[in-house]
């Protein structure tokens, strides 16, 4: 609802109470180029209008692994939080930066290959925010494989030796770059007696890589440093 106070001098004060306005309707389409337009008749054919801009804030996500390294290949899903009556609205943005409606509530999920996804809720955004998210390595059954895999030398100038002991069955080994993209993969069988694989990354750019080893439901992810 609203109140209109005529000051008798050709001016008036219009007060709008937001409880009567559905700020989330898509057909409102409020932006700097297309603001809310309030029109009113002050009597005696005196007609006026005014513009009302909606306040928005920027939410920036910084995604890192447990060692503090940025995961640039992560994906962020940001949505209005429907768990209460204060669901926000997303005006734009993608990747790691979004523009959101002021005072709204939001929920997000961050994921990256080789890591466990992380989800949380942002309540009542009232300023520009930086959300720091730390993703954990996928470590399903890690205690069963942790002591049975050795990687050396690490760091290396290109050639890594990977030894497996006590692991039976099909083993999938995937190499990912710093952006989470798969750059190499191979599959082999292990009889549990011990398998040694050579991994040559000499053709790739220097930097940080990850080896993801999976045997059934058992997964281990290790960092490789290519010098």
Image (tube, rainbow, N blue to C red):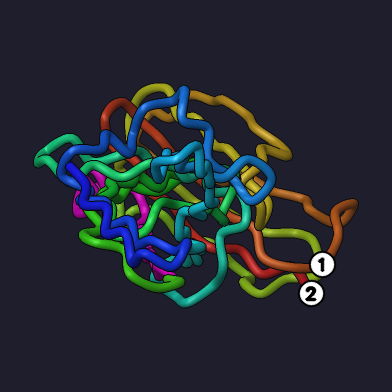
Q: Which residues are magenta?
A: 130-144
Q: Quadrant of the N terminus?
A: top left
Q: Along the line of sight, which residue is nearer the eye, 121 or 180? A: 121
Would you say residue 165 is visible in this rendering?
A: no
Of callouts 2 and 1, which one flags the residue occurring earlier in the amino acid sequence?
Answer: 1
Q: Along the line of sight, which residue is nearer the eye, 177 or 2? A: 2
Q: Which residue is at a point 54% across and 51% down the rendered structure image?
A: 51
Question: Residue 189 in the image: x percent, y percent?
Answer: 48, 24
Relative to 23, say whether 71 is above or below: below
Question: Residue 196 in the image: x percent, y percent?
Answer: 56, 46
Discs 2, 1 touching: Cβ within 8 Å: yes
Q: Which residue is at a point 33% across and 34% down the rendered structure image?
A: 24
Q: Along the line of sight, which residue is nearer the eye, 213 or 161? A: 213
Would you say residue 135 is visible in this rendering?
A: yes
Mark 2: secondary structure: loop
Relative to 102, say whether 30 is above or below: above
- Using the rendered view, name the quadrant where residue 22 is placed: top left
Relative to 68, say whether 23 is above or below: above
Q: Is residue 125 in the magenta section?
A: no
Question: Residue 174 in the image: x percent, y percent?
Answer: 58, 38
**Which residue is labeled 2 in the image?**
227
Mark 1: secondary structure: loop
Q: Is residue 81 left or right of residue 179?
A: left
- Using the rendered view, name the quadrant where residue 204 is placed: bottom right
**Which residue is labeled 1 in the image?**
206
Q: Which residue is at a point 45% across and 40% down the rendered structure image?
A: 44
Residue 159's disc number: none
Q: Is residue 134 in the magenta section?
A: yes
Q: Which residue is at a point 63% across and 46% down the rendered structure image?
A: 176
């Amino acid at each position: 609802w609203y109140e209109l106070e005529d000051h008798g001098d050709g001016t008036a004060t219009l007060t709008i109470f937001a409880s009567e306005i559905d700020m989330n309707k898509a057909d409102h389409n409020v932006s700097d180029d297309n603001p809310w337009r309030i029109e009113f008749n002050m009597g005696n054919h005196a007609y006026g209008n005014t513009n009302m801009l909606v306040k928005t804030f920027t939410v920036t996500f910084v995604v890192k692994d447990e060692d503090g390294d940025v995961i640039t290949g992560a994906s962020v899903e940001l949505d209005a939080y429907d768990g209460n009556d204060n669901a926000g609205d997303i005006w734009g943005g993608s990747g790691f930066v979004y523009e959101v409606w002021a005072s709204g509530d939001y929920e997000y999920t961050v994921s990256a290959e080789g890591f466990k996804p992380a989800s949380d809720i942002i309540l009542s955004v009232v300023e520009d925010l930086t959300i720091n998210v730390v993703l954990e390595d996928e470590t399903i059954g890690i205690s069963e494989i942790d002591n049975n895999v050795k990687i050396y030398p690490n760091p290396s100038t290109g050639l890594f030796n990977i030894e497996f002991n006590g692991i039976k069955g099909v083993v999938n080994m995937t190499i990912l770059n710093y952006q989470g993209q798969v750059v190499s993969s191979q599959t082999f069988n292990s009889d549990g007696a011990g398998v040694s694989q050579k991994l040559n990354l000499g053709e790739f750019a220097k930097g940080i890589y990850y080896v993801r080893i999976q045997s059934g439901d058992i997964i281990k992810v290790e960092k490789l440093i290519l010098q």
